[in-house]
Image (cartoon, helix red, strand yellow):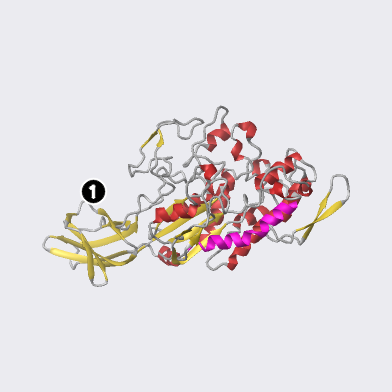
């Protein structure tokens, strides 16, 4: 269902109506709401799925290796997702709708569901009791009229309630900043306790977690209106690039199909309303860059120590060459979102992800991880201020200079070309693609403020420092719980805006 209707629905006090018979002895009064598809069973602010929960100690340092409750259609606290989705088994019957006649008075009641002049469904008369006054039915997305009849003492009353059954279908694709790397469900135990740590992921191979920003944004959207439900198809995977992840199988993460193919298989022809996207960091060589800067002085001027940048004369040359390919890569992703056939990395043509008429694609800019709490460039481990300042201005700044003057350790400087722009600049420029709305909030909150929240910002950091010595290597230089919350709020603001 088109997302543009959400604001109008939210403004309703949700679809309640009433009339009364002359003597008031029988009264029909009812309401309806969509049943949540994104479920938070214990109210902790994180999604609970249907993929099973550790038999004991889910949020401890070492959760049990055996899982219980998988596939029972009951969201247990801290239960992981099943097959990357909160769809609760997308049904051809439609989406669950709750009908509420509990404030009516009378002996019995029934609901009739109409579309125009056609009766879609008529529920048999039932006793009007506290236990039986609510009913759940499945309906496809459409405009309906719900008619509630109440009878008793030889009298009848009825109300007619117009209704729009609407589910917002959210697809989340991308890399580790979207998957939630660094934020398994039991991350707080690792942060607060000492001892051997076993991360508890919603998906082990992809290090996917519902503590990640896309899942937090989906839960916020679910809670925003009882007139809509939300389905999340969450396929982001740590290490993903455009060609090995979005448009091709990410074999290193034990993925046998691209994220595009996985999404279309889950959707089964249903159209997505929102596509959340985080991509580009691995494409321009974040990991290669960090490793090289940690081991070398004058980082942008030397050859990288690892792929994908090591095939270029210098780190700067490599980053700029990779950045120059991003517009074309984003166009290739865009061609796989909608009705047109999708051409994958391996040359195969497959169906793209169907989109609703007013669907939006929200690519997220990366946050600033380079500044200390006082706003100055970080000095961290063996990486000096000059390298953090260079990375901020030439890779993360959405408005980079055309050239950057880099001060050399031996004295003097070298002017580096930034002709291909920056990673975040290219992501922001995706606004040129119809239906694409870049999410700039995470950069604005971290990169456009007097204070910094980077890797060296201490208690105000929104990103983990180097964590190998703490028993959880992969968290390094990824958003921490506070950082994922900031990313989630940025997505939520873009959705509602």
- The answer to whether residue 224 is seen in the rendering is no
Split into 4 quadrants, where in the image is the N terminus?
bottom left
Q: Is residue 11 above or below residue 479?
A: below
Q: Is residue 71 left or right of residue 360?
A: left
- The answer to whether residue 280 is seen in the rendering is yes
Q: Is residue 14 left or right of residue 29?
A: right
Q: Nearer the viewer, residue 469 or 117?
A: 469
Please tell me whether residue 282 belongs to the stretch shown in magenta. Answer: no
Give the image quarter of residue 445: bottom right
Q: Is residue 382 above or below residue 13?
A: above
Q: Across the whole image, how many numbered discs are drawn on residues?
A: 1
Q: Nearer the viewer, residue 260 or 154?
A: 260
Provide the secondary structure element on which disc 1 rests: loop
Image location of residue 7, percent across then percent down: 45, 65
Image location of residue 396, percent across then percent down: 68, 54
What secondary structure characterizes most of the magenta part? Answer: helix
Image location of residue 112, percent across then percent down: 22, 63
Residue visible at 44% across and 62% down in the picture? 354
Residue found at the very far bottom of the displayed protein: 117
> What's the magenta region?
316-337
Residue visible at 84% across and 48% down in the picture? 408
Residue found at the very far right of the displayed protein: 411
Residue found at the very far front of the displayed protein: 347
Q: Is residue 410 left or right of residue 418?
A: right
Q: Is residue 231 left or right of residue 111?
A: right
Image location of residue 218, percent across then percent down: 47, 53
Q: Which residue is mark 1?
A: 131
Q: Callout 1: 10 Å neighbours few (<14), some, many (20+)? A: few
Residue visible at 74% across and 59% down in the picture? 418
Q: Nearer the viewer, residue 392 or 497?
A: 392
Residue found at the very far top of the displayed protein: 195
């Amino acid at each position: 269902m088109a997302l543009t209707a959400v604001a109008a629905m939210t403004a309703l006090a949700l679809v309640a109506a009433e009339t009364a018979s002359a003597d008031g002895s029988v009264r029909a009064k009812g309401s309806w709401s969509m049943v949540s598809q994104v479920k938070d069973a214990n109210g902790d602010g994180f999604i609970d799925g249907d993929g099973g929960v550790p038999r004991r100690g889910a949020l401890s340092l070492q959760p049990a290796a055996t899982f219980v409750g998988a596939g029972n259609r009951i969201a247990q606290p801290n239960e992981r997702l099943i097959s990357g989705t909160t769809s609760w088994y997308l049904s051809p019957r439609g989406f669950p709708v709750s009908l509420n006649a509990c404030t009516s008075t009378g002996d019995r009641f029934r609901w009739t569901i109409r579309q125009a002049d056609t009766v879609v469904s008529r529920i048999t008369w039932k006793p009007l009791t506290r236990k039986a006054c609510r009913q759940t039915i499945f309906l496809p997305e459409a405009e309906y009229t719900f008619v509630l009849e109440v009878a008793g003492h030889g009298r009848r009353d009825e109300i007619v309630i117009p209704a729009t059954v609407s589910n917002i279908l959210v697809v989340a694709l991308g890399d580790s900043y979207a998957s939630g790397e660094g934020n398994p469900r039991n991350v707080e135990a690792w942060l607060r306790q000492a001892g051997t740590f076993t991360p508890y992921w919603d998906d082990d191979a992809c290090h996917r977690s519902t503590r990640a920003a896309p899942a937090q944004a989906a839960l916020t959207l679910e809670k925003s209106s009882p007139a809509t439900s939300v389905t999340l198809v969450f396929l982001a995977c740590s290490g993903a690039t455009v060609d090995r992840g979005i448009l091709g199988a990410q074999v290193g993460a034990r993925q046998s199909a691209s994220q595009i193919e996985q999404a279309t298989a889950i959707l089964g022809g249903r159209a997505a309303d929102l596509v959340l996207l985080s991509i580009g960091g691995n494409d321009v060589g974040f990991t290669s860059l960090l490793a090289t800067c940690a081991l070398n002085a004058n980082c942008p001027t030397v050859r990288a120590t690892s792929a994908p940048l090591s095939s270029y004369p210098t780190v700067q040359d490599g980053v700029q060459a990779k950045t120059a390919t991003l517009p074309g890569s984003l166009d290739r992703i865009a061609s796989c979102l909608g009705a047109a056939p999708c051409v994958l990395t391996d040359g195969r043509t497959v169906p793209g992800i169907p989109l609703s008429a007013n669907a939006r694609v929200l690519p997220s800019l990366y946050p600033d991880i380079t500044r200390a709490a006082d706003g100055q460039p970080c000095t961290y481990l063996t990486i000096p201020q000059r390298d953090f300042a260079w990375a901020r201005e030439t890779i993360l700044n959405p408005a980079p200079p055309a050239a950057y003057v880099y001060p050399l350790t031996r004295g003097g400087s070298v002017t580096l070309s930034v002709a291909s722009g920056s990673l975040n600049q290219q992501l922001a420029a995706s606004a040129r693609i119809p239906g694409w709305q870049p999410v700039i909030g995470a950069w604005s909150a971290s990169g456009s403020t007097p204070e910094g929240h980077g890797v060296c910002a201490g208690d105000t950091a929104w990103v983990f420092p180097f964590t190998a010595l703490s028993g959880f290597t992969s968290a390094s230089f990824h958003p921490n719980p506070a950082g994922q919350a900031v990313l989630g709020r940025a997505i939520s603001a873009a959705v509602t805006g």
